[in-house]
Amino acid sequence: MRAIRIHKTGGPEVLQLEEVELAAPGPGQASVRQHAIGVNYLDVYFRTGLYPAPLPFIPGSEGAGVVTALGEGVEGFKIGDRVAFSTTPGSYVEARNVDVKHLVSLPQSVSYEQAAAMMLKGLTAQYLLRQTYRVQPGDTILVHAAAGGVGQILCQWGKHLGATVIGTVGSAAKAEIAKTCGADHVINYSTEDFAARVGEITKGAKCAVVYDGVGKTTFPASLDCLKPFGVFASFGSASGPVEAFNLGLLGQKGSLFATRPTLFTFMADRARLEAMAAELFEVVGSGVVKVEISESAPLAEAARVHRDLEARRTTASIVLIP
């Protein structure tokens, strides 16, 4: 079967299409024939070596497909089941073995492409909106990169929860995308001072929470967007990591809370994972949250997709089709 493998870290050119063998599933594993594979900025971090991984390796961390074989001791799944998974490395491949602790059953109301496009992004939005800071009706929230994959879900779901949503974007075209996803106000941070605009929009009241997947270029100005006791939730670093800072800033700017949660921690508990997935599938299956797929590309075009992703030429979600 075909797979994308990385033998050395570097640019998109290190993504090589190769033939590999799939072993029989081991104890606690299921073989999954993938119908769609998710593409995330996390994949870039592993490809460049920012997040180390033993070489050679197959990138990618999410997908959706059908169970074709079961290893010893597997319960709760059977051959032919529709399934999806996230945060399990090695998904840029036609078929793979997955530890069933990472699998969730996929309802008919959600397509393979939707699931592959949203598992990491959607579960990230779930833990941010429902667990890191539990959004309540009447809250004002700030979503950075509101036209991106996670940003679009945060805007739609946050609006559904009764929040006033302020989104930041980097272009006029992306501003239109954010608006269609429910952002009540959109700020173009390439032409506007977003912290000043948040103050104007909220008439000085500011926000209960800032959801920031951008990182370096939006910090520390994000702290100036928070009301006293507000939460700065940093969940990504598309522009580079947030550098060390004086914790005294949090006190000076209103007894703020700052956190750097990861999806891996939230998914470590099986019961929590199932509850998160069920809530995500409910809002997507009912149409409350629409998962826009900007491109379905052949697996062989993974390098080109990564170039587009790093150049920030993409919006919404991209999937690879084996």
Image (cartoon, grey):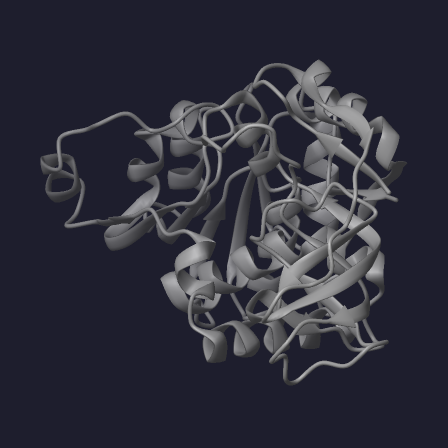
Q: Position of residue 111 (x, y in %)?
A: 85, 65
Q: Position of residue 312 (x, y in %)?
A: 67, 24
Corner quadrant of residue 302: top right
- Using residue 81 as the reference point, say whether residue 127 is left or right of it: left
Circle count: 0
Corner quadrant of residue 1: top right
Q: Position of residue 298 (x, y in %)?
A: 90, 36
Residue located 86% across and 76% down the image: 80
**Residue 134 visible to an observer of this rendering:** no
Q: Position of residue 226 (x, y in %)?
A: 31, 46
Residue located 65% across and 58% down the image: 119
Judging depth in this view, the residue of 10 and 18 nearest the camera is: 18
Judging depth in this view, the residue of 261 and 291 nearest the camera is: 261
Residue located 52% across and 72% down the image: 273
Judging depth in this view, the residue of 4 and 151 nearest the camera is: 4
**Above or below for 171 versus 230:** above
**Residue 6 visible to an observer of this rendering:** yes
Corner quadrant of residue 219: top left
**Above or below for 155 versus 138:** above
- Using residue 235 as the reference point, say whether residue 91 is left or right of it: right
**Above or below for 253 versus 284:** above
